[in-house]
Structure formats: structure tokens, C-alpha cells
Image: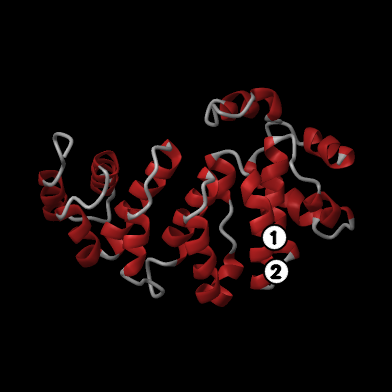
Amino acid sequence: MEQIVKELYELQDKEYQAFHAKLIPNIDSECVIGVRTPALRKYAKELAGRPEAAEFLKELPHKYYEENNLHGFLLPLLYKNVPELLEQLDLFLPYVDNWATCDMMSPKVFKKDLALVYESVKKWLKSGHTYEVRFAIVTLLGFYLDEAFNPEMLQLVASVKSEEYYIKMAAAWYFSIALIKQYDTAIEYIKGQRLETWTHNKAIQKAIESYRIDADRKEYLRSLKVKSLK
């Protein structure tokens, strides 16, 4: 919508635009306005109270990176019912085209019905779309590595086969956090080399970088790195 794009440009920070566009190289820099995330979140809250917010969500695909981020921020503001939010996510996720938009979406409302969200996660993991799969993995990382953890979730992520960098990186990130929060279960996947080699080594690397893993475990993890392809 022209008015919304105009208002986004009013929030533009040109220096930030030049910096941030480099972080999402698969997006044309001309499609990056350059709105800092705190300003965009504030704008989303303001827009959520206006009638054009619902109309904006219907206008897919969006042209600008910030429009996609705005869309992601608006969804949990306008849809606080989990089934409705999941329905809206199913409409939006196929249009997500970069890691940053994907990772910015972490709706707290998911906590109201993690069992239902988990059913959607399993569906997204089977998607052929890079950022639906990544969103599923990041959702498992954000909501299901504590009280809601189930060992089968590790297997779901380990079973994802993809050469897409942003999927492999998400899987490595997930396992690195699993090694922090669910070590006894996650370490079996590392010991058994049940992940693709690159993901295996990257998960170890990211885990070792964490201050939440003690020195002895870090040393053990280093010994489990795969030096050549299996």
C-alpha cells in the first residue's frame, strides 16, 4: 500500500540501509528501505490499530524487505488466536525470501498452544521452501528446547536433507543450542555422526563458542569434529 510504503520511507536511516543490505545479499538493495528494527516494531504497533493493517496483510507479495518484516510483526498483533495465526503464517511463509525476515518472527502467542504449533512445525519441515523449513527449525529452537522438549524433535531436524545454506545453518544453530539445553540427548547425534558433515562441524563450532558449555565438554566436542567426508 502506497501510504504504508511512504511512512516506511519516513523512518529510513540511509546509513543503516547501506549496512543492512549487505547482510541479506540475496535481496536487491533497492528493495531495502533501511528501517531499524526497533522503529519498525513501534510502527507495527501503531499500524495494528488502523483499518489498513488488515488490508496490508492481504497484499502479497510485498516489494520491500521492510514490508515483509512489518507483515511478520503485524501477524501476532492482529491474530492472537493460535489457529488463526497459523493460518495466516501458512499464507505468508511462502513469500518470505531471506533469513532475517524469517528469524524476526517468534510469536509469543505460540506458547498458548505449543501442541498445535508443533503440528504446523512438522508440516513446514517438509516444505520445499527454504524459509518455511528454516522457520520450522528456528521455532523448534525458540520454543521446544526447554519444558516442551521431546527427543523426537532432534530426529526431525536431523532428517532434513537440503543443500540450502540457510537451512543447514539453522540446523547447526539448533543442535548447538540443543547441546546446551538437552546435552545428554543431543550429544548422541554428534557422537553417532548423524548429521551431514558440514552441519555436524558447524554445530560443534557454535556450541564451543558458547559460554554456557563448560571447558570439559568443549574439549570433548572438539574431539568429535569430522575431519573428512564420511
Q: Is residue 135 left or right of residue 66?
A: left
Residue 4, given in percent of the width and then of the height, sits at 84, 42
Please name whichever residue, 137 or 110, is drawn nearer the observer in this view of the structure: 137
Judge whether 2 appears above or below 179 on screen.
above
Residue 3, given in percent of the width and then of the height, sits at 89, 40
Q: Residue at x 24, y 61 (%)?
A: 186
Residue 166, given in percent of the width and then of the height, sits at 45, 40
- Residue 88 is tagged as 1
Q: Residue at x 87, y 57 (%)?
A: 50
| Residue assigned mark 2 | 84
Q: Are marks 2 and 1 in contact (CB under 8 Å)?
A: yes
Q: Is residue 57 left or right of residue 139?
A: right
Specify the quadrant that holds the N terminus.
Answer: top right
Please name whichever residue, 144 or 37, is drawn nearer the observer in this view of the structure: 144
Mark 2 is on which residue type?
Glu
Q: How is the image coloured?
A: secondary structure
Secondary structure beneath label 1: helix
Q: Is residue 161 left or right of residue 107?
A: left
Q: Residue at x 11, y 48 (%)?
A: 219
Q: Residue 8: in sight, yes or no?
A: yes
Mark 1 is on which residue type?
Gln
Judge whether 189 appears above or below 83 on screen.
above
- Residue 25 is tagged as none
Q: Residue at x 52, y 30 (%)?
A: 23
Specify the quadrant that holds the C terminus.
Answer: top left
Secondary structure beneath label 2: helix
